[in-house]
Image (spheres, helix red, strand yellow):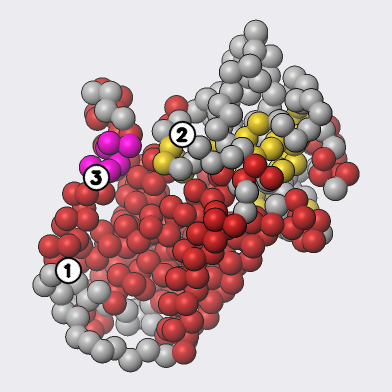
């Protein structure tokens, strides 16, 4: 624990952990400090690997869907790493950290886990309107992400930039804006994954027949759909997010929580309408891996409920990279302003578990969890 709890400035951190170094830590040490984080990581990795096994078992387009989800994770996390606007999220140390300890390995399993199980569940609804299936996929991704973000932020699995306006409005610690972004981005992901293939491979037909929707096409078309869905969906998702946020929040001043709730109610109504006229025929036969995927999906929600109910966030201690401590009396020209100890929000963390707050310039330090409000 000494290496974890050691206070470092950003320059000292760079000396101790060179760029692009893969860092491996003792899981028992990390479990003692943040048990909820280690358990959450294990579930995400198991869920991602189980989804991969399910995709390989089903064959067809499902392995390409899993790889598209994984590629989405690489692009999202990579865009944050190379962002010219500085850091807005700081992960606590994990068993395996990559790229200057800014990206934990487990996060690359989260995206295919969430995206795959959402698209799998949406496909089983057998909706007549394909738009409603893409809407369902987006809603299901957010449904899986919501408890994950709530528990992860409250139990300091990662911390967010304290003064970033886009992250200021929260629902039980989870930013409303992140929920909206993942909803529209995963909607675009589902739409592009199916339609890029049909545009590239005319043999499948447009619109795609239901019985050929998951039948693999030409390798070239599938690779274009996989890469295109992962990359273009982020741009489309950003555009859709701004289309909602800029006129309603920036211009009219409507709170993000009202915007997000309104959008979700509208799309949920559209989904509900078409779900009343679906092509579902019950019962459906399921394989062992189908049942296993159902169990891990339900277990995902049960786990975060149990963690929130059993563990006390006030006992959480996170030693690692956090928003740099700044001088409250001097502003800097950086894109990511430092943390001011006099004015920062103490909703998610404070310094009650250590003898004194870190000094100005500190980048690696310890923060303490706070009780539920």
Badge 2 element: helix
Q: Residues within 10 Å of mark 2 (few under 14, many from 20)?
A: some
Where residue 14 sits in the image (x, y, percent)? 79, 36
The residue at the far top in this view is 329
Badge 1 element: helix
Say whether disc 1 or disc 3 marks the residue closer to the N-terminus.
3
Name the magenta segment's main secondary structure: helix
Badge 3 element: helix
Q: Is residue 334 left or right of residue 272?
A: right
Would residue 261 be counted in the magenta stretch?
Answer: yes
Where residue 1 sits in the image (x, y, percent)? 85, 48
Question: Is the C-beta separation of discs 2 and 3 under 8 Å?
Answer: no
Q: Image point 69% across, 24% down: which residue?
A: 325
Say whether disc 1 or disc 2 marks the residue closer to the N-terminus.
2
Q: CA distance from mark 2 to mark 3?
A: 18 Å
Q: CA distance from mark 1 to mark 2?
A: 33 Å
Range shown magenta: 257-263
Residue 334 visible in the shown view: no
Q: For mark 3, what is the residue? A: 263
Where residue 333 sits in the image (x, y, percent)? 59, 15
Question: Is the C-beta separation of discs 1 and 3 under 8 Å?
Answer: no
What label sits on residue 304 in the rendered view? none
Q: For mark 1, what is the residue? A: 275
Q: Nearer the viewer, residue 145 or 373?
A: 373
Q: CA distance from mark 1 to mark 3?
A: 18 Å
Q: Nearer the viewer, residue 354 or 235?
A: 354
Q: Residues within 10 Å of mark 1 (few under 14, many from 20)?
A: some
Where residue 167 sits in the image (x, y, percent)? 46, 34
What label sits on residue 167 in the rendered view? 2
Q: Image point 16% across, 57% down: which residue?
A: 270
Question: Quarter-wise, where is residue 129 in the image?
Answer: bottom left
Q: Image point 33% across, 34% down: which residue?
A: 256
């Amino acid at each position: 624990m000494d290496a974890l709890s050691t206070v470092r400035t950003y320059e000292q951190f760079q000396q101790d952990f060179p760029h692009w170094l893969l860092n491996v830590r003792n899981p028992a040490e990390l479990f003692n400090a943040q048990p909820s984080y280690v358990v959450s990581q294990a579930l995400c990795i198991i869920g991602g690997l189980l989804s991969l096994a399910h995709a390989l078992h089903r064959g067809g387009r499902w392995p390409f869907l899993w790889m598209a989800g994984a590629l989405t994770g690489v692009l999202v996390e990579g865009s944050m790493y190379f962002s010219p606007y500085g850091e807005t999220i700081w992960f606590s140390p994990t068993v395996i950290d990559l790229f200057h300890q800014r990206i934990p390995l487990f996060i690359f399993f989260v995206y295919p886990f969430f995206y795959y199980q959402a698209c799998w569940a949406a496909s089983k609804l057998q909706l007549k309107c394909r738009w409603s299936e893409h809407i369902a996929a987006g809603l299901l991704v957010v449904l899986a992400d919501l408890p994950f973000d709530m528990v992860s932020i409250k139990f300091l699995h990662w911390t967010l930039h304290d003064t970033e306006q886009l992250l200021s409005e929260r629902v039980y610690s989870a930013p409303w804006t992140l929920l909206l972004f993942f909803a529209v981005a995963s909607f675009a992901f589902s739409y592009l994954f199916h339609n890029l293939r049909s545009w590239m491979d005319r043999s499948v037909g447009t619109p795609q027949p239901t019985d050929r929707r998951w039948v693999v096409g030409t390798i070239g078309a599938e690779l274009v759909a996989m890469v295109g869905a992962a990359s273009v969906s982020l741009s489309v998702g950003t555009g859709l997010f701004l289309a909602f946020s800029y006129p309603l929040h920036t211009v009219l001043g409507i709170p993000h929580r009202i915007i997000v709730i309104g959008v979700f109610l509208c799309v949920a109504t559209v989904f509900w309408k078409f779900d009343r006229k679906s092509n579902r025929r019950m019962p459906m036969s399921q394989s062992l891996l189908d049942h296993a995927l159902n169990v891990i999906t339900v277990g995902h929600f049960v786990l975060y409920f149990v963690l929130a109910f059993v563990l006390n966030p006030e006992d959480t201690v996170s030693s690692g990279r956090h928003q740099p401590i700044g001088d409250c009396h001097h502003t800097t020209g950086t894109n990511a302003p430092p943390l001011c100890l006099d004015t920062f929000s103490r909703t998610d963390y404070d310094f009650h578990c250590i003898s004194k707050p870190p000094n100005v310039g500190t980048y690696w330090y310890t923060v303490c969890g706070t009780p539920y409000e």
